[in-house]
Amino acid sequence: MINREQNPEYLNAFLDYSATILNKSPNSIKEYNYDLTMFLRFIKIHFNMVKDIEFDQINISDISIKDIEKIKLEDIHAFLAYLSNTYHSKAATRARKASTIRVFFKYLTQKTGLLKINPAQNLENPKQDRRLPKYLSLDDSRKLLDATLDEDNRNYQRDYAIITLFLNCGMRLSELVGINIKDIDFSDCKLNVIGKGNKERTIYLNNACMKALTDYLDVRPKEGIKRDSKNSEKALFLSERRERISNRTVQYIVNKELEKAGLDTKKYSVHKLRHTAATLMYQYGQVDIRALQELLGHESISTTEIYTHVNNEQIRNAVESNPLANI
C-alpha cells in the first residue's frame, strides 16, 4: 500500500498519470513509488539535505521542484553506484530503477513542463550479463507431468492442469492465477491473460491443455465459493478454501510436484517452467522468434532471444559432425 502523504505532490501526480494514462498495473505503480522514494532519499543525502538519519526514515515530502531541478546525470549515476556498492544490487535491479527514473523525468519535462531540462535523457541502462535460462529437458518435463497425475492427491486434476499450462503455454505466475473461466474460449481453443503492464494477450491452447482444463472443470467446486474482492467465484483455479488460488499456493504445488518427480527444487521453480515452455517450443517446434515473443508477452525481442541458445547436446553433435572428426 502506497502512503501518498509521504510523497511530494509531483510524485503522486506522476503515479496517477502512470496508472490512468500509461495504464500501468498496481504492481508497476508500487515499483515506481518504491524506486523513486529510494532515489529521492538518496538525493537528500547526496545534496547534504539531511544528516545522521536512517535511510528508511528520510522524509521526501519536502523535496521541492527547485531541488529536483538541481539533479544532473552524474547524480543519477551516483545513485546507481550507491545501489551497487551499498546493496550489491544486480544489473537487472539497477536497470529497472534507471528505467523508472527515465519515465519520471520524461513526465516532469514533456508532460507537465515542471522541468526544462531532462537530466535522464542520456541515461543508459547498466549492461546486464546474458545468462542462459535454466529449463527442464523434454524427458524431465514428461517426468513432472507423470508425477502430477497422482490420484492419491485429491486435487490432482487441478494441479495437473496448472503444470500443463505452465509447460505448454509459458505463462507467468500472475497470469495463471488471474485466469477467470470466462477468459477461456473453448470453441476456439484459446484464452486471454493479463500480462505485464496490464496488457492483454491471447494464448492458444493445444490438445493437452484443453483436456487438462476440461478434466479439472469437471471436478472444480461449484458451490461454497467465496464472494470476495479477488472475484473468486469467477476464478479458474481455486484453493482448498474455495477462493482464487494464490501465487504462494501455486509455488507450493509446483515445488511439491518437482520433488515427487525427483527434480531439484533449488534449480527449478515456477518461472523455470516458463523458460522450459519457451525453450521446448523453440527447439522442437521451430517457432519463429517473433511468434515466441508474442506468445510470451515480451515487450522487447532481445528478452526473447535468450531462448535461441542451443543446448550442449546440439553443440556436441555439431562437433561430432565435423568431417574432420574421424581423421
Image: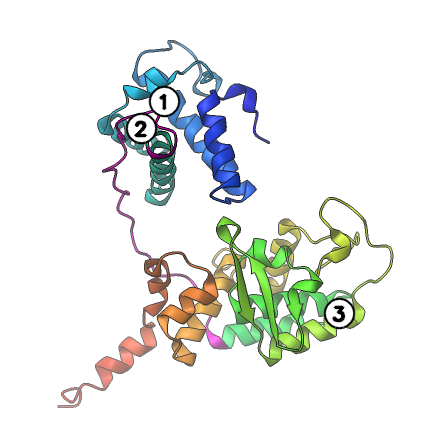
How was the colour assigned to the protein in this rendering? Answer: rainbow
For the image, the number of numbered tags is 3
The secondary structure that most of the magenta stretch takes on is loop
Residue type pointed to by label 2: Phe
* Image location of residue 108, percent across then percent down: 36, 29
Task: Give the image quarter of residue 302.
Answer: bottom left
Q: Residue 21, can we see it? A: yes
Report the span colored magenta.
110-138
Along the line of sight, which residue is nearer the eye, 247 or 125? 125
**Any part of residue 261 in sight:** no
Which residue has dot 2 on it? 79
Residues at marks 2 and 1, CA–CA distance in whole angstroms: 7 Å
Q: Is residue 167 above or below residue 180?
A: below
Q: Residues within 10 Å of mark 2 (few under 14, many from 20)?
A: many
Residue reaching furthest to the right: 223
Please say whether residue 113 is one of the residues in the magenta stretch. Answer: yes
Left/right placement of residue 15 relative to residue 325 reads: right
Quadrant for the C terminus in the image? bottom left
Rendered position, 136 above or below 269: below
216 over 201 or under it: above or below: below
Local packing at callout 3 (Cα closer than 10 Å; few below 14, some 14-19, many 20+) is: some
Left or right side of 307 for 199: right
Amino acid identity at mark 3:
Leu
Mark 1 and mark 3 in contact? Answer it, CB < 8 Å: no
**Where does the image place residue 145, in percent across and percent down from the top left?**
60, 73
> Which numbered tag is attached to residue 217?
3
Q: Which residue is mark 1?
A: 42
